[in-house]
Image: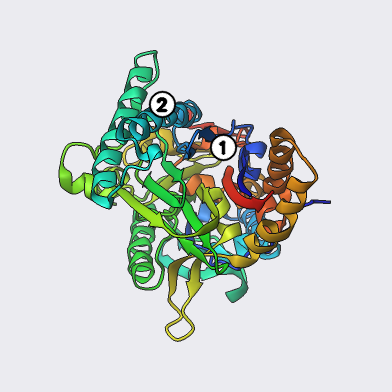
Amino acid sequence: MQDWNYLYASVRGKGHIEENIPCQDDCSVFQYTGYTICVVSDGAGSCENSDIGSKTVTQSANIHFSSLVEKKKWNKGKKITLEEWQQTSQKTLRAIRDDLEKISTQGYNFKSLSCTLIVVIQIKNKLLVTHIGDGRAAYCNSNDEWVAMLTPYKGRYSNETVFITSDIWEDEISLNKYIKSTVVVEKIKAFCLLTDGCENASFECYKLDEETQIPEDINKPFKDFFHENVNLHIPNLIKSQKSEQELNQIWKSFLTDGNDTLKNESDDKTMILAVKVPQ
Amino acid sequence: MHVLTALSPNNFQKPCLCILALDVSGSMAGAPIIELNKALEEFYQIINIDDEAAEKLELCLITFGSEVKCIQEPAKVDNFKMPSLEADGTTKLVDGIRLAIKQVELRKEYYKKYSPQYSRPMIIVITDGEPDNGQDIFGLSEELKNDMIAKKYTFHVIGTTDCNYAKIAQFCPKELIYQLNELDYRRFFKWLSRSTDELSSGKRIEDISGSDFMHQSPIN
């Protein structure tokens, strides 16, 4: 028998601790019979209520996407096509955006709630992925290969991206440009989704091309970040009967200062790591 | 000691251009230029020993007196030595700012070819005076206004001692003008060395921690 385990946490970055700014990231894992919804959200650093925005969309994503899965009976084995997922995920993200607009009537400026969103729904051997903005996500197949499953949207300047509050909802061209959805169907032993505060630690992002000396975003999960944790340390923790709370505390501590890159990261850091561990 | 362990890749740091447009007119002679030189040298040393900053921060130095010069093209600190400034002449402040804007444009062209992303460039003007008569203040005002809307760069003027804030405000939005106590350049550059990310992101100076030694210009 095998089972899935989820480690998830959001921690403040070095810069936010020094500035006494609250954690603007949020994440959650919602487990249902037959499927699990994983959500990470990164509140825009320049927006004063983005911590409220990220918490709101995380909860709202659970409500709307669980409703979608059950309505479509995807959790009961009904076929999911890429086209249907792309269409329905766009509509569902719009509903989440509208929830955020309702919150804004409680005295928050709508744009001050700006945040990104990555949603991964795991249904048996499928991962349904959708996102607005930056951040990263990847899965590990049965050959121990890590594969990226989204391309972050990056603006002209670093830290510039598109948010769920951005003006992208009025026409199909914008929707298709800024909202990307995909379906992964493969034997999966682990997957992750993370905000950009974790990308320097866990992804090869910008590498200099040796010939041209021009850096490119290769968007490649860094195997040495994941491999030992997924194959050794996390299975050992599971076998030692750690509770979900204890696991997340260990994960939180790891994301805080697990190595120099994590320790020195100025931005908030969020990662959900899902690992299949033989029972 | 962590139960979990992980190695991380060496990712290329996105470049961040900081242009310092510095007043070297005659009024800066004596203590002001001595203090400014000390502060610049300390700034250089702090960046040099900070691996992350040294890898991403590109400094460009422009001086304006009777002449306007780019005395250091954009470069990382390990590629140049901090020059020592000498004060003399009048204050071609507007020309100095225009040269800074030109440097931003040139460097952006370079980044577009050689870097997938870069931080928003910063222009910081330090002056103790006012622009010479006959300089195109109103043309500059219009240019700055448009560039701020287009987020082409961040822009701040830091004034000291006898700075004519009313004249500066004729071309620069008031909220971007700050006053430094006496000749506290060293404190300013120490603060700048740890605040470039936030300044480049467009954050207001008063919202960046440790900036309480600076004040909005007295004309507000």
Name the residue beneath numbered marker 2: A63
Q: Do discs 1 and 2 share a chain? A: no
The x, y position of residue A154, in whole percent, is: 38, 54
Residue at point 41%, 26% (across, down): A63
The residue at which mark 1 appears reads as B208
Identify whether B52 is placed above or below A104. Answer: below
Q: Nearer the viewer, residue A244 or B106?
A: A244
Circle 1 chain: B
Question: Mark 2: which secondary structure?
Answer: helix
Give how far across and how far down residue B219 sits, in percent: 43, 27
Q: Which mark is residue A1?
A: none
Q: In front: A239, or A18?
A: A239
Quarter holding residue B50: bottom right
Is residue A150 visible in the rendered structure shown here?
Answer: no
* Left or right: B99 in relation to A250: left
Three-letter amino acid code of the residue under disc 2: Ile
Q: Residue B107's spot in the image, x, y percent?
A: 38, 67
